[in-house]
Amino acid sequence: MDNYALPERATPRNSLPLLAALWAAIVAASLYLAATYDRPSVVILSSDTSRFELAQNAQNALIAYGSVVAVTGPGSVFGLALPALLALAPLGIRRYRRGALLVAGALVFGICLIWPLSIGVLYLPTALLLLLAGVAR
């Protein structure tokens, strides 16, 4: 029986960074396309409206939804794609791949700390997979 070895690009130690990049790309695409922001819009017609009437009208107000890019501008696309790019970067480095994985994982974890309550939590699996790949290598 012949033993066939998998090529290096298909080994499990390369699959963790690829899985991390895939997760980050899915999160970035969903944040780019999905309506995640909501803005209640209330029109005040007169200046003598009481606070009770404003609160009552706010419950019946229309809510406008927008994606991250629609609300923050097209410059946010780079910020959404940055964790995916950081996850793919160590795959191009052969000699110091373990260090590159740990640095990329630390940078993505830093992104998670900078954006903790908005979208940083969604990129946490990417950071953990990169750190795990760096430690397991």
Image (cartoon, rainbow, N blue to C red):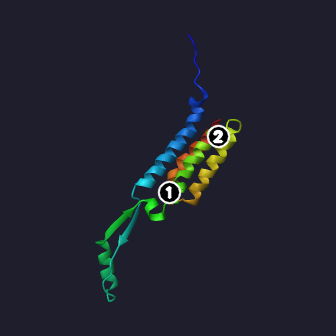
Give the left or right position of residue 36, taking residue 131 as reference.
Answer: left
Q: Is residue 63 left or right of residue 28?
A: left
The residue type indicated by label 1 comes to Ile
Quarter of the image where the N terminus is located: top right
Residue 102 placement (x, y as % from top left) = 66, 44
Residue closest to the eye, 127 or 18? 18
| Residue position for label 1 | 119
Answer above or below: position of 44 versus 110: below
Q: Earlier in the sequence, mark 2 or mark 1?
A: 1
Report the residue marked by disc 2: 134
In the rendered image of this protein, does residue 41 appear above or below residue 88?
below
The image quarter containing residue 53 is bottom left
The kind of secondary structure element at disc 2 is helix
Q: Secondary structure at mark 1?
A: loop
- Could you tell me residue 130's position as x and y percent? 60, 43
Q: Residues within 10 Å of mark 1 (few under 14, many from 20)?
A: some
Residue 57 place in picture, x, y as percent? 29, 76
Q: Return the x and y of residue 44 as percentages of the image width and height.
A: 33, 81
Picture residue at 57% right of the left edge, 47% below the top = 85
